[in-house]
């Protein structure tokens, strides 16, 4: 009887298979990722990741570029909100608490050029990106000379590890030197009680006296302050 019981157990496992030990990527998301891999990849999203959020597993697709929105999906593929991105970098306002409340990050996909990009919850021993802004971009900048030396909406201060605007402070997560005088910076920004992630692109003039923010369509130009 004992041998018969063992045989029945083996047969049962053979029919039903071993239990699944790892969470699988949903079919709808796998299809999206395959589409990203098969495309030429003009401005691909920085990453696709899963998180635990308010008791559910959700899927985050980062902004493709600049002032575009990110997208947060539920497990069925329904769009929930845009947590970040857009002109303000704060998304569409439907889930402003997502960045602060999300946990259990799992990176599901990155474009080949972004394999070393930073994650907000990356492990300390993971490969670290360049997080230092080149010296020629650092300093205080303003829309007009009269706005230098005082708080103004056009104020911008760039340091080796931060990009601070009038109403927000940005901690540098990664720096990509696009050209000799052009950089793209991934920031974790905070202001008015909120935290969000954004990517900004800056271009320095030939003489180093003006800095153009290429992130939005308006291309804001600021002059260097001598203070």
Image (cartoon, helix red, strand yellow):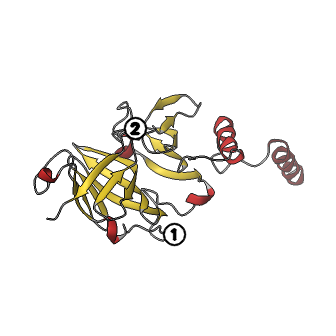
Q: Quadrant for the C terminus, please.
A: bottom left
Is 161 drawn above or below residue 143 in the view shown? below
Regarding mark 2 in the picture, which secondary structure is present there?
loop
Find residue 163 and report its horizontal and vertical position in percent: 29, 57
Give x and y (percent) for residue 220.
Answer: 32, 46
Left or right of 69 on screen, residue 152: left
Q: Is residue 49 left or right of residue 25?
A: left
Residue underneath mark 2: 86
N-term-proximal mark, 2 vs 1: 2
Q: Secondary structure at mark 1?
A: loop
Q: Nearer the viewer, residue 95 or 181?
A: 181
Q: Nearer the viewer, residue 36 or 12?
A: 36
**Tag in front: 2 or 1:** 2
Name which residue lies at 56% across and 47% down.
43
Q: Residue at x 49, y 36 (%)?
A: 71
Q: Relative to the observer, which residue lies in front, 119 or 56?
A: 119
Say whether marks 2 and 1 touch (CB < 8 Å): no
The extreme top residue here reads 78
Q: Label for residue 127? A: 1
Residue 50 higher or lower than 138, as above or below: above
Residue 49 or residue 41, whichever sits in front: 41
Label 2 packing within 10 angstroms: few (<14), some (14-19), many (20+): many
Marks counted in the figure total: 2
- Identity of the residue drawn at 11% across and 57% down: 149
**Neighbour tally class for label 1: few under 14, some 14-19, many 20 plus, Cα within 10 Å:** few
Q: Is residue 27 above or below residue 174?
A: above
Work out how far the residue at label 2 is from the one at label 1, CA to CA, in angstroms: 28 Å
> In the image, residue 151 lies at what x, y percent?
12, 50
Q: Quadrant of residue 66?
A: top left
Residue 17, numbered label: none
x and y percentages locating residue 59 in the rendered image:
53, 40
């Amino acid at each position: 009887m004992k041998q018969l019981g063992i045989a029945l157990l083996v047969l049962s496992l053979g029919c039903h298979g071993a239990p699944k030990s790892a969470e699988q990527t949903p079919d709808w998301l796998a299809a999206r990722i395959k589409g990203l891999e098969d495309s030429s990849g003009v401005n691909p999203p920085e990453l696709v990741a899963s998180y635990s959020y308010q008791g559910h597993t959700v899927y985050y697709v980062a902004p493709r570029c600049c002032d575009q929105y990110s997208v947060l999906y539920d497990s069925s593929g329904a769009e929930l909100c845009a947590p970040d991105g857009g002109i303000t970098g704060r998304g569409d306002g439907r889930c402003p608490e997502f960045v602060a409340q999300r946990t259990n990050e799992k990176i599901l996909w990155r474009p080949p050029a972004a394999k070393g990009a930073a994650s907000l919850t990356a492990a300390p021993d993971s490969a670290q990106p360049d997080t230092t802004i080149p010296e020629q971009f650092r300093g205080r900048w303003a829309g007009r000379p009269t706005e230098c030396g005082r708080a103004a909406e056009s104020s911008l201060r760039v340091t080796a590890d931060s990009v601070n605007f009038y109403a927000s402070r940005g901690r540098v997560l990664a720096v990509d030197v696009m050209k000799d005088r052009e950089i793209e910076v991934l920031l974790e920004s905070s202001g008015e009680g909120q935290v969000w992630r954004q990517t900004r692109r800056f271009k320095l003039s030939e003489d180093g006296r003006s800095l153009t923010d290429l992130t939005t369509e308006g291309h804001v130009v600021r002059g260097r302050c001598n203070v």
